[in-house]
Amino acid sequence: MTSAALDAHELAPQAAPAAQGAGPRRGAHPVLRRFATRVISGIVVLWAAATLAFWTLQLVPGSVVDILAGDLSDPVLRDALIAEWQLNLSAWDQYVAFLGRLATGDLGTSYVQRQPVLAVIGDQIGPTVILALTAGVLGVVGAVLLSTFSIGRKRAVRASLSTIELVFVSTPVFWSGILLLLVFSFGLGLFPVAGANGVQSLVLPAVALALPTAGLLSQVLREAMERTMLEPFIVTVRARGVREALVVWRHALVHALLPGMTVAGSLVGGLLGGAVITEQVFGRPGLGSVTLLAVTNKDVPVVLGVVLLAAAVYVVVSTALDILYTAVDPRLRGAR
Amino acid sequence: MTTTLERPPATDAASSASVSARRARTARRARPPRPAVVVALVFVAFLVALVALPGVFAAYDPYATDIGSSLRAPSAEHWFGTDRLGRDIWSRIVFGARFSVLIGLAAAAISVVVGTVVGIAAGLSGAFLIGRSGRVLDEGLTRSMDVISAFPAILLAMLVVTFTGPGVWNIALAIGIAGIPLYARVVRAQTFVVTRADYVAHAAVYGRSRWAVLREHVLPNALVAVPVLAAIDIGTSILAVSGLSFLGLGPQAPVPEWGVMLAESRDVLRVAWWAGVFPGLFITGSVIAFTTIGRWLQTRDDGSRS
């Protein structure tokens, strides 16, 4: 993240003269300019997220030592916490120290688990990443298939597809998980009931987690594609004799990607938050049980670490998608 | 309504467009709602009845255990079967509506009130009430909303619960906070547009005070989208509430909240499918019903989708 920002800083001024000569727009080459502003605003959001977390900790009633110690009470622990968070300093100095530690990747120490937070998260993040990624891919593929299939169909077909989307979006992952377990594990005996051993145990959780993603994204894609299909250029494409399937996939779908990206953030958030719940339904190890245990034990450093990590993932993904899309869509190059 | 429809078309070309748009809207409002909307309205009315008078609908005490009739399948006696402790699942769902629906409503109310206030403040600050320094306030509020929405809602709610401890009102607060940015953004954008509209300038020219312009013109027009968003958001909040309850962070074990019931069903799924099916049916049903009503209100208000 930081190295990308540095690159942007270095590149932006170099590109400036060329752009000034080429057109009316001032400043750097539009793509690089947008790249730089996006990366910087991503960093600002991350900084603000960390700041918000820190000051919330200060504002919550009760002394910070007690909050960080959770349900543990031990004078040695209190001394360790005061030393680590530098609680004897002023609030402002604590804040600067907190940001300094975050910048070096130090998320603090979990005194409940007697380990650094980063180690606690690192041990358990693997299965969660695999689950969220698989579900994300499944969800996007499902959404693309659902939405492209609905284009140009009869009214009844479209209506039933949009009902399916609504049901997907409205079904909590823990209930779809339970239903999948009932049918495929207890009923048909196809998949294991719990655990994380191999691909077999990944199928049902990934499907349960993918459903809301597929539903939400499909709604957005379908609406955008229906609007695109009414545009004059689609007539031109058809007049060239392009096959209808190609019209949908190459032209309508591509135009729907930008509206699709506007929900990318909530999709990432949904996948991360949903993974925590899904893991509980299927008894999978991962960040879910770590976070839940931390919440019930009031292990604040761990919860803060997980939440900040999730915010970082959100910021990185949405920034990356935004930059990627600017590079692809010429209409956005002048923007900001 | 019908007289409006039968009125002859206006002759003026410029005004005929707006007249026909208005007439189309009137026609949309006069048209009976789709069957799905009727079903959704009936379901919500049913939920309201469950919340208001659970005793009328429930045949059993939702907390009364009866080990003798543990894990009975659905029958005439127990419509939705019984759970491990022999409690009647239908009666528990009926009494659970008070928790699931009311906590969802409370969470949505927090998001609506705070989000609307923030949105109006941000929308007005940039325009005509506070002046130039207002731009800083607008930018600050808008950016804070961006920051809140960078946290996944469920995880943000879990962080709040870490501080407050589990409980009914704590999860309403937690989910309410996560929902604020949605309203703030929409209301800010709408306020921004309305304050720059000609009719607001006219009212000011006619000598109405700023407060009167705000009250009579800006607020009513800036807030039109809020009920629609709220209807959809109640569904989303119910979903989030049941999720946190499923994780054990909301109302605690003997309480018949729907998410809690599903969490309890996890251990008996192999032998009692009904324990895992019916509470979820009510969660999903409520979410679909509120979303459908919200979308219906939306299409009634604007003609963009037919």
Image (tube, rainbow, N blue to C red):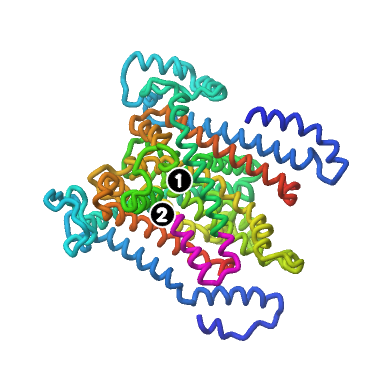
Outermost right residue: A21
Sequence-wise, the earlier of marks 1 and 2 is 2
Q: Position of residue B214 (x, y in %)?
A: 56, 56
Residue drawn at (59%, 37%) of the image: A316
Q: Position of residue A74 (x, y in %)?
A: 31, 17
The residue located at (61%, 36%) in the rendering is A42
Q: CA distance from mark 1 to mark 2?
A: 15 Å
Q: Is residue B26 above or below residue A228?
A: below
Find residue A81 and report its horizontal and vertical position in percent. 41, 18
Image quarter for residue B212? Answer: bottom right
- At x 50%, y 50%, the residue is A213
State whether residue A41 is above or below residue A217.
Answer: above
Query: Along the horizontal axis of the image, is B154 left or right of B279?
Result: right
Is residue B205 visible in the rendered image? The answer is no
Give SS at disc 2: loop
The kind of residue tagged 2 is Thr
Which residue position is annotated with label 1?
Answer: A206
Local SS, label 1: helix
Is residue A42 shown to the viewer in this render? yes
Q: Which region of the structure is painted magenta? A: A147-170
- Residue B2 lies left or right of residue A293; in this view the side is right
> At x 71% / y 75%, what residue is drawn?
B14
Judge whether residue B58 is colored magenta. no
Residue, disc 2:
A171
Looking at this view, is A63 or B228 the one in front?
A: B228
Quarter placement of the C terminus of chain A: top right
